[in-house]
Image: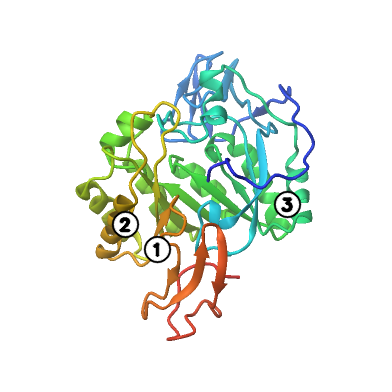
């Protein structure tokens, strides 16, 4: 979910360089003051006075600390469709938050100014907002969910975890928009409080290695594990000309999703040049249409187009009779006739979380 174009509210001004340090979760001490971070699949071994690949987890005298606890860099109210989540509480609002930092170094990062700040600017900025305050404001603004988004939520896991626990007590659900690189331990810890996730499935192994500084299989494993834990999962692929738009690659990605569950929605978004990937053109609409056709041909029930307002492929159809049950225009719901999770025309269940 991109921060550009978010709905702005009258929040207080940012306060920078908040001196709050919180001991990290999910790490172990290895001896000689070295620690092993078990938050994401990089599993960084961090020496004293050094940070992990994310740039926000620091070893201080043999104890791992998060440098972004209570350091909010962005907050806004978004439609849930912007995450994008099309089968989870459609038409609802989501209180969306982020800190700086990311455990990927994607060359096409859409929010590089905040995601890559610890690397590019050697800074960590943030607004001191307690988890209780986030939950209170989300409730006051009638948000059905809190979304941990814009940057990778895994890297501000402690902040997200505490906020999610408090939100659940207030009847507010929790959503991650993630690169899916968290460890099994992290998934299992957050799972009782996480209701939905959209995971980027960016490409195959060469793409991850060259463009993102990561690996393909851990992301697939995360999609599968979250689905098995009962978290509602949707998947997004940003289709970039010449990098991950071949029929072979798209077929493979569709097959991976279908092997987990053919009902998992797959969002195919058009690329626009960004950050350090300025030499690629905007993705043609024809490429996105072709990618959607491939997904449907491989058996996926719910394949959507993104970043192409007005294109076919934004509506949700019944998996049996194919009649539209939700009509959309961009992030707006134009009509929703689902009744108790069922298609009103034929009575077939439509996978999702509707209430």
- Callout 1 secondary element: loop
Q: Which mark is residue 170?
A: none
Label 2, label 3: how far apart the Cα atoms are: 36 Å
Q: Nearer the viewer, mark 1 or mark 3?
A: 1
Left/right of residue 281 with respect to residue 38 in the rendered view: left
Q: What's the mark number on residue 312?
A: 1
Q: Are marks 1 and 3 in contact (CB under 8 Å)?
A: no
Does 199 sit left or right of 353 as displayed? left
Query: Mark 2 or 3 closer to N-term?
Result: 3
Which residue appears at 29% of the width and 59% of the height?
A: 295
Of pointers 1 and 3, the one earlier in the residue sequence: 3
Q: Tell me, yes or no, whether the two marked residues, 2 and 3, touch with CB atoms within 8 Å.
A: no
Specify whether residue 195 is in view: no
Q: How many C-alpha atoms fall within 10 Å of the one at disc 3: few (<14), some, or many (≥20)?
A: many
Task: In the rendered view, tell whether residue 332 sits above or below residue 136.
Answer: below
SS class, disc 2: helix
In the image, residue 56 sits, relative to residue 261, either above or below, namely above
Task: Residue 196 in the image: state x and y as whole percent.
Answer: 53, 56
Q: Which residue lies at the image location 70% right of the left edge and 44% below the top edge?
A: 8
Callouts 2 and 1 close, C-beta under 8 Å = yes
Mark number displayed over residue 289: 2
Q: CA distance from mark 1 to mark 3?
A: 33 Å
Task: Identify which residue, 224 or 36, lies in the foreground.
Answer: 224
The residue to which callout 3 is attached is 138
**x%, y% of residue 352?**
49, 67
Disc on the earlier residue, 2 or 1: 2
View extreme (bottom): residue: 346
Indicate whether 124 appears above or below 261. Answer: above
């Amino acid at each position: 979910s991109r921060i550009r174009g978010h709905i702005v509210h009258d929040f207080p001004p940012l306060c920078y360089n908040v001196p709050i340090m919180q001991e990290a979760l999910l790490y172990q001490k290895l001896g000689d003051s070295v620690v092993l971070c078990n938050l994401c699949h990089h599993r960084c071994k961090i020496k004293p006075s050094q940070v992990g690949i994310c740039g926000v987890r620091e070893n201080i005298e043999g104890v791992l600390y998060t440098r972004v606890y209570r350091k909010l860099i962005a907050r806004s109210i978004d439609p849930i469709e912007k995450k994008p989540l099309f089968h989870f509480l459609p038409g609802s609002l989501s209180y969306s938050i982020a800190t700086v930092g990311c455990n990927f170094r994607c060359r096409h990062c859409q929010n590089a100014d905040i995601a890559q700040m610890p690397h590019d600017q050697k800074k960590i900025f943030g607004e001191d907002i307690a988890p209780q305050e986030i939950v209170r404001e989300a409730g006051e603004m009638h948000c059905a969910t809190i979304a941990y988004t814009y940057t990778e939520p895994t890297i501000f896991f402690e902040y997200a975890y505490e906020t999610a626990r408090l939100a659940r007590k207030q009847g507010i659900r929790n959503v991650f928009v993630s690169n899916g690189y968290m460890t099994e331990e992290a998934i299992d810890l957050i799972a009782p409080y996480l209701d939905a996730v959209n995971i980027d499935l960016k490409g195959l192994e060469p793409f991850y290695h060259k463009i993102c500084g990561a690996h393909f299989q851990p992301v697939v494993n995360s999609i599968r594990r979250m689905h098995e834990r009962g978290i509602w999962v949707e998947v997004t692929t940003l289709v970039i000309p010449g990098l991950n738009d071949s029929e072979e690659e798209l077929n493979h990605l569709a097959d991976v999703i279908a092997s987990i569950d053919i009902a998992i929605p797959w969002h195919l978004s058009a690329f626009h040049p960004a950050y350090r990937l300025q030499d690629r053109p905007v993705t043609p609409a024809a490429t996105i249409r072709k990618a959607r056709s491939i997904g449907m041909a491989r058996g996926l029930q719910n394949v959507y187009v993104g970043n192409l307002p007005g294109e076919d492929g934004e509506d949700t159809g019944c998996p049996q009779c194919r009649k539209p049950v939700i009509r959309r225009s961009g992030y707006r719901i134009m009509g929703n006739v689902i009744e108790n999770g069922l298609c009103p025309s034929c009575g077939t269940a439509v996978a999702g979380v509707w209430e």
